[in-house]
């Protein structure tokens, strides 16, 4: 009797232990401009559902990602560590036979880190961290479920997806036309890709509502190709520019999906137990997809703010103040730091996270800054950006002297103050050199590299 009582109690507390851990949903857009959501002032594309995350939570006006293009930014987010530390500094080529072309197994992903705390993890949408099934498939990297595509982008229209097996795509552009993967299985496309991913996200929430989950909703929208259905296009009769119109339609489709996820969480009474983060993986490439990063300088791929400062908002009902704005710099790396802290799992000592738990900062309990310094290096271009406090140095070529901008009154980085503040330039450049010594060279060739680029490849 005693034994039975003890076992029941243990089982009870064990299940409480599991359900008490908060869920996390990260909704990441691809190449969405800083100014292309209502909460950052967008006027021509209504995004009421995305905005509701900021209205019911915190808008982070100084939210950064770890790199201004997709692959490395995502490698940073999923590990909570600067991708330059482990050589993921280029967009990987689509190589289903190359285990080295993706996220190294020496690094742990969020799902791998929080699995010991009982989390069930899913990814829906774009992966872009390696196409080698046996080592790089999301389910080989800690995810329990996958629905999406392995490459860096995808066509949105079912009739364009003519390559059945992902393994048969020979290069990046082929990979845009594969069927989708449901776990390891190739499945025929069902509908407009963004709607398809939203359906899956809603189903994931319903299926996993009784235990702690981590869900990465990795929309490839509004990344090129610019493709949208009439349902969304006809919402924008007043936009005359064809590119901007299609882009707006694509963003609107994402917004609908976000609304459906939020309703699902409400329906199952999960809002108080679920952290929802929304962000873009890098700045908008204005010329390519008609995105808008104003008032920031630069675009996707740049070390200017427009390259890696992104729309960023976090909601956690009852835990984070409603409708507040947080102005200290935060990083996409902090999403790993946050969920890992809430899950209560240990981090390997030799691989500390660069991300921190944001909750005490966002709820005002910790008045200091989550990060004194935000770093960026682009190895192939010899470019750097280092922000310390409100001042930021920018280096644009090898041996180039840094320029300095004060973001507190010059968000558009127009006034180079390097000559007026030489001490600060020196200080911040010292921080840069110190950080740079901790990094390694890229371990694989990028999309832009031809096979005859052997010099910088280490393995
Ligand atoms: Ca991107």
Image: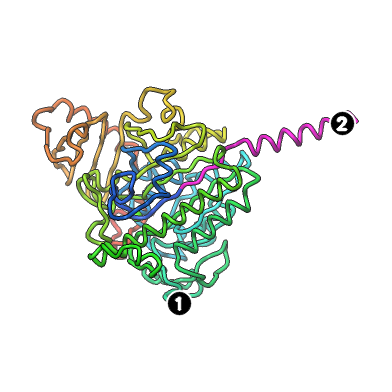
* Measured Cα–Cα span from mark 2 to mark 1: 60 Å
Give percent across and percent down for residue 376.
29, 42
Quadrant location, the N terminus: top right
Q: Which residues are magenta?
A: 1-26
For mark 1, what is the residue? 162
Whether residues under marks 2 and 1 lie with C-beta atoms below 8 angstroms apart, the answer is no
**Residue of label 2:** 3
Queried whether the magenta region covers residue 19, the answer comes back as: yes
Neighbour class for label 1 at 10 Å: few (<14), some, many (≥20)?
Answer: some
299 versus 229 height, above or below: above
Q: Is residue 234 found inside the magenta-colored segment of the image?
A: no
Q: Residue furthest left?
A: 419
Q: Residue at x 18, y 27 (%)?
A: 424
Question: Which quadrant of the picture is home to ligand 1?
Answer: bottom left
Q: Residue at (42%, 62%) from the top-left corner?
A: 151
Q: Main secondary structure of the magenta part?
A: helix
Residue 169 sits in quarter: bottom left
Relative to residue 125, is residue 399 depicted above or below? above
Q: How is the image coloured?
A: rainbow
Mark 2 surroundings within 10 Å by alpha-carbon count, few (fewer than 14), some (14 through 19), many (20 or more) = few
- Dot 2 lies on which element? helix
Q: Position of residue 109 (x, y in %)?
A: 50, 46
């Amino acid at each position: 009797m005693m034994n039975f009582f003890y076992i029941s109690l243990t089982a009870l507390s064990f299940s409480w232990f599991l359900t008490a851990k908060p869920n996390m949903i990260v909704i990441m857009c691809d190449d969405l401009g800083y100014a292309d959501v209502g909460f950052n002032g967008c006027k021509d594309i209504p995004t009421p559902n995305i905005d509701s995350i900021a209205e019911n939570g915190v808008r982070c006006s100084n939210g950064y990602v770890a790199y201004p293009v997709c692959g490395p930014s995502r490698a940073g987010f999923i590990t909570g560590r600067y991708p330059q530390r482990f050589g993921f500094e280029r967009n990987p080529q689509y190589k289903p036979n190359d285990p080295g072309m993706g996220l190294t197994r020496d690094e742990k992903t969020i799902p791998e880190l929080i699995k010991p705390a009982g989390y069930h993890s899913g990814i829906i949408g774009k992966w872009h961290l390696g196409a080698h099934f046996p080592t790089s498939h999301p389910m080989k990297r800690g995810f329990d479920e996958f629905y999406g595509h392995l490459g860096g982008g995808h066509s949105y229209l079912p009739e364009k997806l003519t390559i059945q097996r992902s393994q048969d795509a020979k290069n990046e552009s082929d990979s845009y036309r594969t069927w989708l993967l449901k776990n390891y299985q190739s499945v025929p496309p069902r509908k407009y890709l963004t709607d398809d991913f939203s359906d899956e996200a809603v189903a994931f929430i319903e299926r996993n509502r009784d235990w702690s989950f981590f869900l990465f909703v990795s929309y490839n929208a509004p990344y090129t190709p610019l493709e949208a259905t009439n349902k969304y296009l006809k919402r924008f009769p007043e936009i005359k520019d064809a590119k901007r119109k299609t882009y707006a339609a694509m963003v609107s489709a994402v917004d609908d999906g976000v609304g459906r996820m939020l309703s699902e969480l409400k329906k199952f009474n999960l809002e108080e137990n679920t952290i929802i983060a929304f962000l873009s993986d890098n700045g908008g490439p204005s010329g390519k997809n008609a995105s808008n990063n104003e008032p920031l300088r630069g675009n996707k791929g740049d070390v200017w703010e427009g390259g890696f400062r992104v729309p960023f908002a976090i909601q956690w009902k009852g835990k984070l103040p409603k409708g507040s704005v947080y102005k200290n710099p935060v990083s996409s790396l902090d999403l790993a730091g946050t969920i890992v802290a809430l899950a209560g799992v240990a981090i390997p000592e030799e691989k500390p996270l660069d991300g921190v738990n944001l909750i005490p900062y966002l709820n005002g309990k910790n008045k200091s800054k989550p990060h004194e310094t935000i770093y960026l290096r682009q190895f192939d271009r010899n470019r750097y950006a280092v922000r310390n406090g409100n001042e930021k140095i920018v280096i644009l070529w090898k041996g180039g002297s840094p320029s300095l901008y004060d973001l507190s009154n010059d968000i558009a980085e127009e006034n180079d103050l390097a000559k007026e503040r030489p001490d600060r330039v020196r200080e911040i450049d010292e921080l840069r050199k110190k950080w740079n010594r901790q990094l390694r060279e890229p371990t694989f060739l990028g999309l832009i590299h031809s096979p005859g680029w052997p010099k910088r490849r280490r393995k």
